[in-house]
Image: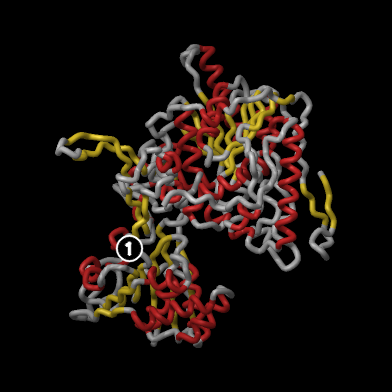
Amino acid sequence: MGRIETVWVGRGGQGIVTATYIIANAAIIDGYYAIANPEFGAERRGAPVKAFLTISDAPIEDQEPIKMPDVAIVFDDKLIDLMRFVLDAVRPGGYIIINSGKPPEEVKKIVSRDDVYIVVLDAIDIARRHVKLDVPNGPLAGAFSKVMGLPKLESIRQAFENQLGKAVEENFAATKEAFETATVIPPARVDPSARPKGVISTTSAFLAGPYEIVEWTAVNKGGVVFPGTSLHYRTGGWRIEKPVIDHAKCIMCRKCWLYCPDDAVIEAWREVEGPRGRKFRMKAIEFDYDFCKGCSVCAEVCPTGAIQMVREI
Amino acid sequence: MSEARGRFGGIREKIYIRRHHITLPGVKIAEEYPGLYEYASFELPQEEFFLPGHGLCASCTIGVIARHMLKVLGPDTIVVNPTGCAEVSTVVYPRGNWAVPWIHVAFGNGGAVASGIEAAIKALKRRGVIDSTRKINVVVFAGDGATADIGFQALSGMLERGHRVIYVMYDNEGYMNTGIQRSGTTPFGASTTTAPAGRKVPGNVTHKKPMALIAAAHGIPYVATANPAYVHDMVYKFKKAAEADGPSFLHILQSCTPGWRFEPKYAIRVLELATETGYWVNYEIDRGEFRVTMPVPKRKPVKCFLQLQGRFRHLKPEEVETIQAVVDRDVAEINKAMGREVIGPVDPSLACITPRGK
């Protein structure tokens, strides 16, 4: 089979590093050689993470980052725009595996490539049903096994036992369901001699916003950063669920505003219609979806239950 | 320091449970206090100086602490930030989210740098460079590692020299930034990567270092413990610390989602339970007067606080009893010091999670 190079893209806390270790472990049980190396910045749970996994039938001697993968696995469909350069770098005839609650046709439109296989599955839903957690790594490992034909499901189960040591049955059930239900959209045309649109650059992979790459001589003196520069960093993409407020139940106690760690709860003027058709403006709680990380603290502290969390991806 | 031997049947090591000594020399008990913190109305400014767009974990309460701290202290504030979660995730080179002057310093010298800044401001005021009536707050915003362990001597020196600096310690009970290692404030029984729970040893075998009382022993004007779940109480303490004429020290509990291993939505709930179970007591020592600012008429069993968190999941019932005994002893000491019952007895009939409207 030669050599398969894969790039896994997700967010911290989704089990992306564990997923690559499990696939590598399972491939080694099957008798292949595998190497998995994650790459992430100084950030926390929820920030974008990239991991590389290479499987080969000959010993692997290089540990370099992968430039043009055969397979890209995306753990979160909101990362597609941010990580467009990864999808563009997939070789024609390769695979893009995406975790999304959207219908497969819609996902295909977002990906906007017709020379690769697109695999869509709702891994969050599967994981919630089986593992009771928002970690889509087990189902995505199953989808990987389905489209690549390796590693074997039984080896994945063995790898779960080696790697996790607990909740093996639940995770394996999720993997198996994904193996059976993932939707595969074949490409319209494949030109094996074509080259992908770009390669994955090794620098500034996580810079999101209007930044430009400058030489070291043009860096601010003393490493000074200016206030307000963080506003370019939209953390809204981190969330799985978004808060929605029912204004009829809200009593304006502003507890959500007090406890929001991201300053994403704002007081805004809202136009409402009175009983006799009179229009007036009143203050109301709204959310800043550019920065809300979807931690559900506001819904938990709400004394009247006016805030509900609605699934987004 | 009291010593208990063989508490866990078969363990040979000594288990040290530190004893809090509230009866510090020169500290007397405050007069009856009419619950000002609980009922006072206050107005928080709308302006934010801790801007969104930082990389803290979803539901990290560092954001809550820093937002309210800067709302109270205002724009004339200089923040000194030793290494820690708050530093690495709020300022990543091309971007920063503090809308006030901010400096990153090494792990161990937060107190020393703040002393220097305060002395420089004093000198510039004397020379007439800065208006001498202008009030500039210098704040150290440090974690428990940068305060209780590594930065301790710089802190002690700063307190002893009497610089007018507000030292805010957010205590997430471990080195959460580098991957959940044990620190001096990790509680008894918590499982961390350097004090893992095994078959014989139930995680960490020492109890929290009483940092607020250590700071109070320096004889500084204002020391307090606070909890972000009780924002009104915390905000008043920031205000008092800013008004103090000399160093002030605030020890603030902060919940950590990956380190304490609870669901992100319980970030505030778990802190509420810390106070409701008597595990964390909000008190202040204001010019030598000791006062509990958040009385709890009836306590919940400490099990309520422990069962929400994955780091205590391994505990056996008898180990939970040990933690309950430690909490009972600390509460009894505080009640004895206050001379009346401010933190009530355990009432097992109380529901662990008080339902909120749904």
Disc 1 marks a residue whose amino acid type is Ile
Percent position (x, y) of residue A196?
A: 26, 71
In the image, B214 versus B28, the foreground residue is B28
Percent position (x, y) of residue B117?
A: 55, 26
In the image, A268 versus B183, the foreground residue is A268
Q: Is residue B259 left or right of residue B26?
A: left
In the image, A153 versus B358, the foreground residue is B358
Tag 1, which chain?
A
Task: Locate the C terminus of chain A and report the quarter of the image it occupies.
Answer: bottom left
Which SS class for mark 1?
loop
* Relative vertical location of residue B318 with respect to residue B67 in this rendering, above or below: below
Residue hosting label 1: A313
Colouring convention used in this rendered image of the protein: secondary structure
* Relative vertical location of residue B82 with respect to residue B262 in this rendering, above or below: above
Q: Quadrant of residue A47?
A: bottom left
Give neighbour class at mark 1: few <14, some 14-19, many 20+ (Cα, 10 Å): some
